[in-house]
Amino acid sequence: MTDIATRATRVVAQTGGRRRRLNGGGPRAGVIVAFLTPFFLPFVLFYLVPVGYALWQSFLVVRRTGGQYGTSYTTFGGFEQYVQVFQNHEFWASIGRIGLFGIVQVPIMLFVALIMALLLDTPLLKAKSFFRITAFMPYAVPGVIAAIMWSYLYSPQLSPVVDLLKGIGLQPDFLGPDAVLWSAANVSTWLWTGYNMLIMFSALQSIPQELYEAAKIDGASNWAIAWQIKVPIIAPSIILTTVFSIIGTLQLYAEPAVLRQISSNISSTFTPNMLAYAVASGNNYQQAAAISVVIAVITFVLSFGFMRLTSKRAGL
């Protein structure tokens, strides 16, 4: 009995030692640190440090001694910059535009992406690889280049599309005050639909084929399989793409900034990011930092709130 207890004690001690080597120090821990360092070092230097610096700048204000033309100095101003942000009507106008953009563009883009993913997943479709690559190709085009391409198609002087529509009696004004927001939305939809489609399609590929076979035995049609089996199962992927789209919407910059070069209906404060850039260009870095922090907080609240709400309803 004593020998058995002794051997058991040795086994426990050896196992504990191995666990300590895995969890705490040892060569394997060093390897893990070596692999993680190339990620965490740039993450800290180029993400956390700039975020912290911007947050600090947002609490500073520039004062002057001796009147308007006196010597300027920077001092701590508390929430003064944030008060100015919330009192800025251009900021709220840009938030309103981007909110309308997101309410309309995001559901349309994700619905089209979902339809494309379902079509690619059906066994009736041939040449799936070709259509998958074709749908994903716009995402490979940088946003600025895509905006330049579409600005050529929107321009009344250069666009063959405008000439074609005029030939059948229409007078399109893609860059007019009522249409320019949706022209930018069209560029974003063209760019990101394939990306979201690929995420949904990847989720569809992980569904066991036995589920479809059982549903067909029970008499389910392809339509019923798509909307009653596939869509509920890939709900987490749909939620994920929606969160990405909310974040991307509030960061909208490239498309309207490029279209602004050919349209007077896009101001320098058209979107929140453009407003922050315009303020920073005027050397008011503290105000620009405060705008950026507010945008980040709004983005976090909307994306995290949507994720919590939809996850609860989906039972995730």
Image: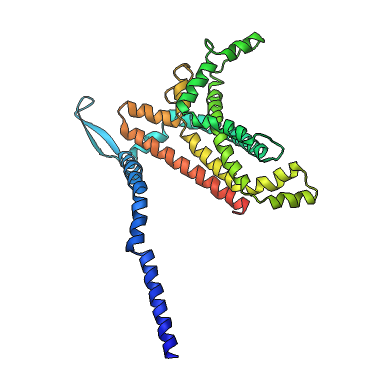
Q: Position of residue 183 (x, y in %)?
A: 55, 23
Determine whether 4 is above or below 58 in the image: below
> How many numbered marks, from 0 up?
0
Q: Nearer the viewer, residue 73 or 109?
A: 109
Q: Residue at x 43, y 86 (%)?
A: 5
Q: Residue at x 50, y 46 (%)?
A: 304
Determine whether 247 is above or below 277 in the image: below
Q: Is residue 165 left or right of residue 24?
A: right
The residue at the far bottom in this view is 1
Q: Position of residue 142 (x, y in %)?
A: 46, 29
Q: What colour scheme has been applied to the protein in the rendered image?
A: rainbow
Does any portion of residue 196 appear in the rendered image? yes
Determine whether 160 is above or below 127 in the image: above
Classify the position of the N terminus by image quarter.
bottom left
Q: Residue at x 30, y 28 (%)?
A: 283
Q: Is residue 181 left or right of residue 63?
A: right
The answer to which quarter of the image holds residue 306 is top right
Q: Nearer the viewer, residue 88 or 156?
A: 156
Q: Nearer the viewer, residue 258 or 127?
A: 127
Q: Residue at x 51, y 40 (%)?
A: 244
Q: Position of residue 250 (x, y in %)?
A: 48, 35
Classify the position of the C terminus by image quarter.
bottom right
Does any portion of residue 270 appear in the rendered image? no
Q: Position of residue 52 (x, y in %)?
A: 33, 44
